[in-house]
Image (cartoon, rainbow, N blue to C red):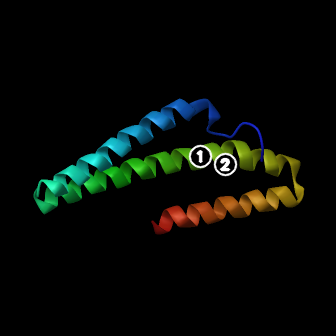
Amino acid sequence: MTGAHGYSARKDDYTKRLRRIEGQVRGISKMIDEDKYCIDVLTQISAVNSALQSVALGLLEEHLGHCVSHAVAEGGEEADKKLAEASAAIARLVRS
């Protein structure tokens, strides 16, 4: 699909959130460099994982509400393709 994506309206929000996550990951690296307590490092890793899951779920919601719904409305092979893509993405998120 070309043109605007489902997340386009919230692109700045996603970018800001990913920058915060990037900072959290750098902080974890620093914690390890400074020999911080294992549980404290694991707690921060858990927080990053949760933040990434939140971004992923937001993107998935945008994809379903925009790309998939438009393809389904048009029907045909493109609808089947978008539904299969969404199903595979959901499966990856569930496994992660």
Please report the residue visible at 78 percent of the width from the left and 43 percent of the height from the top: 2
The residue tagged 2 is 64
* Crowd band around label 1 with a 10 angstrom C-alpha radius: few (<14), some (14–19), many (20+): some
From the top left corner, tell me how far across and down residue 55 is, in percent.
48, 46
Residue placed furthest toward the bottom = 95
| Apparent side of residue 83 relative to residue 17 in the rendered image (left or right) | right
Q: Under tag 1, what secondary structure?
A: helix
Residue 52 or 68: which is nearer the viewer? 52
Residue placed furthest toward the front = 33
| Apparent side of residue 53 relative to residue 69 in the rendered image (left or right) | left
From the top left corner, tell me how far across and down residue 28 is, in percent.
24, 52
From the top left corner, tell me how far across and down residue 86 is, in percent.
66, 58
The residue tagged 1 is 61
* Crowd band around label 2 with a 10 angstrom C-alpha radius: few (<14), some (14–19), many (20+): some
Snapshot quadrant of residue 6:
top right
Residue 76 or 49: which is nearer the viewer? 49
Please report the residue visible at 87 percent of the width from the left and 61 percent of the height from the top: 77
Please report the residue visible at 31 percent of the width from the left and 50 percent of the height from the top: 25
Residue 14 or 30: which is nearer the viewer? 30
Query: Which label number is shown at residue 96?
Result: none
Snapshot quadrant of residue 35:
bottom left
Separation (CA) of disc 2 from disc 1: 5 Å
Quadrant (top left, top right, bottom left, bottom right) of the C terminus: bottom left
Which residue type carries mark 1? Glu
Q: Under tag 2, what secondary structure?
A: helix
Which residue type carries mark 2? Leu
Disc 2 to disc 1: CB gap under 8 Å: yes
